Image (tube, rainbow, N blue to C red):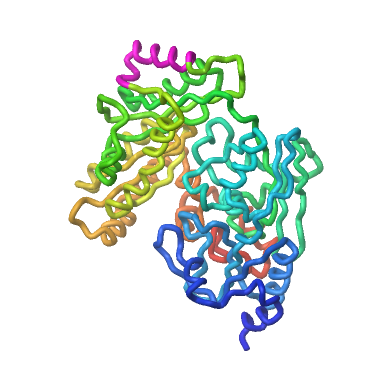
Amino acid sequence: MDKIGEALDRLPDHMITRDQDIIAAYTTDFRRLYTGKTSALLRPRSTTEVQQIVHVCAQYGVPLVPQGGNTSYCTAATPSDRGDELVVSLERMNKIRELDASNLSITADAGVVLSDLQDSASNAGLLLPLALGSQQSCRIGGNLSTNAGGISVLRYGMARDLVLGLEVVLPDGSLFRELSPLRKNNSGYDVKQLFIGAEGTLGIITGVSLKLVRQPRQTVTAFLAINAIGDLPDLLERAQVQTGESVTSFEYISHSSLELLLEAKPHLRHPLQNESLHYVLLEASTASPVLNLEETVTGLLGELFELGLVTDGAIAANGQQRAEFWHLRESIPEAEVHHGGSIKHDIAVRTSRIADFIRSASDVVEHQAEGAILSVYGHVGDGNVHFNVVPPGGSDASEYKTWFEREVSPRIYDLAAQMDGSFSAEYGIGRTKLDLLDRYGDPGKLRVMIALKRALDPAGIMNPGKVVAV
């Protein structure tokens, strides 16, 4: 019997699935670019059962691939094609352990779906500000393992900024537990931060405590046509000052991205009468019952029209129109898939340089890949732009993507590096960006990461081949 078989014999049958028809959904990545293999799927129901799995597999040297909602863009939650790893899904660990409204905190299992956490907070009159396009299926443990971003980073920060406490099963099966939702705990190293963004390579997150905020009493959403992309930093500055730092989202949508969407989904309508090369979806919110936020935003737009920064715009008149505005923004990736998929570049630069990057990167594509269709959008309020490229009509999409990633993508990443930016704003590293981390990562940081991996996981059983190549 091989070591996997011996390890499985020591685990309870109720957590083991060997049916390959069921397992198939767990071995292909979210973007369907990579399919791995595993002989069994493990689905524990508690932290104790996760400890049991890790303890046994550590003894036999069986590698483990932790998986939440399997929504990673970088194959971080997908096993290799060697078939020598076991997938550990946290989906059955889906209990909310505590909601402390007075403390503005929520504590939950790592397998809780993000939208369920949001609903629990909402039912208590509170808000969990982590918001993603995949929130109906992604799970909070995976969100923290990848340090998810989303549409509210401008106001509330990345996923790590919302974490108060963490519970993690370490590679030897022991438990790190600092789950108390304290806002002040200055008792040595902030160890929990090691596991946020580590993509399961240092341990398996099993429990989380998160910050909540007061639910907004007022939310104002505006879809704007802007005159020039170079005005983005000025627009954001004026919006923040006018609203008293109440802007939660500041999303850029290029004309080409919107056109791809409207072509893919003709039933959708353009939100404005006048077209533009550039659009901004701006949202502000406040828990204040006193501030008249709609009046404030209306005054802001009047000023922007007078200055010529905005050429057309609409403020959502109700919740349905707000949802329609957001549906346009969130459906762009789906439109790219409709047109054959895209080559994705998840770039971060300073907000002051975002317009320069978009212009310069667009010039690179225009000169190096004639006929390519740009789809540029993203959370530019925090410096994150999704600079995506759709293959030209009539081309072989697979061959074109391979060529583009080899010949043109490096120029885009070089440009981001020259601007002191990052090739990975919110998607993480996984398996697909190891070469980029090696090329653009700080050598000192890489040495520390490798040292941490070797210290905590000397046998290399935790999500091998992801994030750090050791």
Relative image position of residue 210 (x, y in whole percent)? 67, 42
For residue 155, above or below residue 263: above
Q: Is residue 445 visible?
A: no
Q: Quadrant of the N terminus?
A: bottom right
- Residue 311 part of the magenta segment: yes
Question: Magenta region's main secondary structure?
Answer: helix
Residue displayed at 49% across by 48% down:
134
Relative image position of residue 325 (x, y in whole percent)? 39, 33
Residue displayed at 75% across by 48% down:
179
* Front residue of 299 and 22: 22
Residue displayed at 28% across by 58% down:
403
* Front residue of 301 and 230: 301
Q: Quadrant of the C terminus?
A: bottom right
Residue farthest to the right? 187
Residue farthest to the left? 394
Relative image position of residue 324 (x, y in whole percent)? 39, 35
For residue 288, above or below residue 380: above
For residue 285, above or below residue 55: above
The quarter holding residue 315 reads top left
For residue 152, above or below residue 98: above
Q: Is residue 442 visible?
A: yes
Relative image position of residue 53 (x, y in whole percent)? 69, 70
Task: Please indicate whether residue 371 sits to the left or right of residue 171 in the image.
Answer: left
The quarter holding residue 456 reads bottom right
How many labels, in total? 0
- Residue 430 part of the magenta segment: no
Residue displayed at 56% across by 46% down:
115
> In the rendered structure, which segment of residues is drawn in magenta?
295-312
